[in-house]
Image (tube, rainbow, N blue to C red):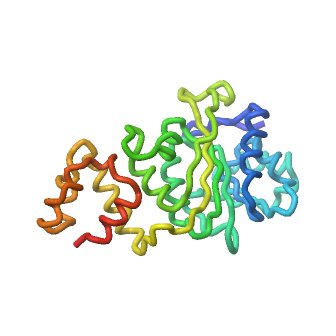
């Protein structure tokens, strides 16, 4: 068997009905190249290996899990990248889709990695801590709406699919989980400087309870800061609003 490593945030999915539900959500999207992040004990992997017409690969940091997976699923030989998803390069040539029961301790970092790859990632079906999943899918004027909401929704359409109970995992996490689906929307708002956009959004939400003219005062000319828009708070602006603001920054 294998051991669970708290340092890697490992909570392995054991409920096959949930696994099949996740794979069903995945198969509703067209794809030919699939990357599983953190296959662990292979709960999802065994349903993904033989998908027809799909080039499947996995990325796993834990060497013990890699040995376990190859022993139990010999066809995985040569298809597992022994790296962290946060450090690996492009796993395929061309576009690919991502699936995973993401380690909760680095789930936000994984999303930022996906955003780096947004031109290559066609879609994603993933399990996150419910609080994070809700945040990713939230819209403006909502307490859950934040940095992740804006940055992800700038490039992907997001759908919250379903909750997953703690008892579906070994060991059970102390929080509920949620599964979301992200589909690449291209670059509908024509964001030409991703770094500048990310910085604007992060700065705005850095003081989310204050009027925007406070956190953003160094980014705009004084005359622009007098506009009514800057009396709003970060959570009141949609993606398009932030793109328009970015185009007027100093």
Circle count: 0
The quadrant in which the C terminus is found is bottom left
Residue at 54% of width from left, 26% of height from top? 174
Q: Residue furthest front?
A: 228
The picture quadrant where one finds residue 90 is bottom right
Q: Give the camera-side residue of 24 and 112.
A: 24
| Relative to 5, 227 lies left or right | left
Image position, residue 74 (x, y; %):
87, 53
Picture layout, residue 116 above or below residue 146: below
Q: Give the camera-side residue of 183 and 18.
A: 183
Image position, residue 219 (x, y; %):
21, 65
Q: Give the camera-side residue of 19 and 243.
A: 243
The quadrant in which the N terminus is found is top right
| Relative to 249, 145 lies left or right | right
Q: Residue furthest top?
A: 167
Picture layout, residue 194 above or below residue 138: below
Image position, residue 23 (x, y; %):
76, 46
Residue at 59% of width from left, 46% of height from top? 159
Picture layout, residue 73 above or below residue 80: above
Residue at 19% of width from left, 50% of height from top? 231
Picture layout, residue 209 above or below residue 61: above
| Relative to 109, 78 lies left or right | right
Residue at 34% of width from left, 57% of height from top? 201
Image position, residue 242 (x, y; %):
35, 60
Q: Give the camera-side residue of 120 and 61.
A: 120
């Amino acid at each position: 068997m294998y051991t669970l490593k708290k340092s890697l945030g490992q909570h392995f999915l054991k409920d096959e009905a949930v696994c099949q539900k996740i794979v069903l959500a995945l198969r509703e999207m067209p794809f030919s190249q699939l990357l599983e992040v953190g296959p662990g004990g292979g709960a999802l992997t065994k349903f993904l290996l033989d998908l027809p017409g799909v080039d499947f690969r996995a990325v796993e940091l834990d060497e013990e899990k890699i040995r376990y997976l190859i022993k139990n699923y010999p066809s995985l030989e040569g298809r597992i990248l022994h790296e962290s998803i946060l450090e690996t390069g492009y796993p395929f040539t061309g576009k690919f889709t991502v699936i995973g029961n993401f380690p909760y301790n680095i789930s936000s970092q994984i999303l930022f990695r996906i955003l780096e790859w947004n031109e290559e990632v066609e879609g994603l079906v993933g399990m996150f801590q419910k609080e994070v999943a809700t945040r990713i899918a939230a819209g403006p004027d909502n307490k859950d709406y934040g940095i992740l909401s804006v940055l992800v929704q700038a490039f992907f359409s997001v759908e919250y699919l379903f909750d997953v109970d703690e008892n579906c995992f070994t060991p059970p996490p102390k929080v509920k989980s949620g599964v979301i689906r992200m589909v690449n929307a291209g670059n509908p708002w024509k964001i030409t400087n991703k770094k500048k956009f990310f910085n604007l959004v992060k700065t705005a939400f850095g003081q989310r309870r204050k009027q925007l003219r406070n956190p953003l005062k160094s980014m705009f000319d004084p005359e622009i800061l007098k506009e009514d828009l800057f009396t709003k708070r970060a959570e009141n602006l949609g993606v398009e609003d932030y793109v328009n603001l970015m185009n007027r920054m100093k």
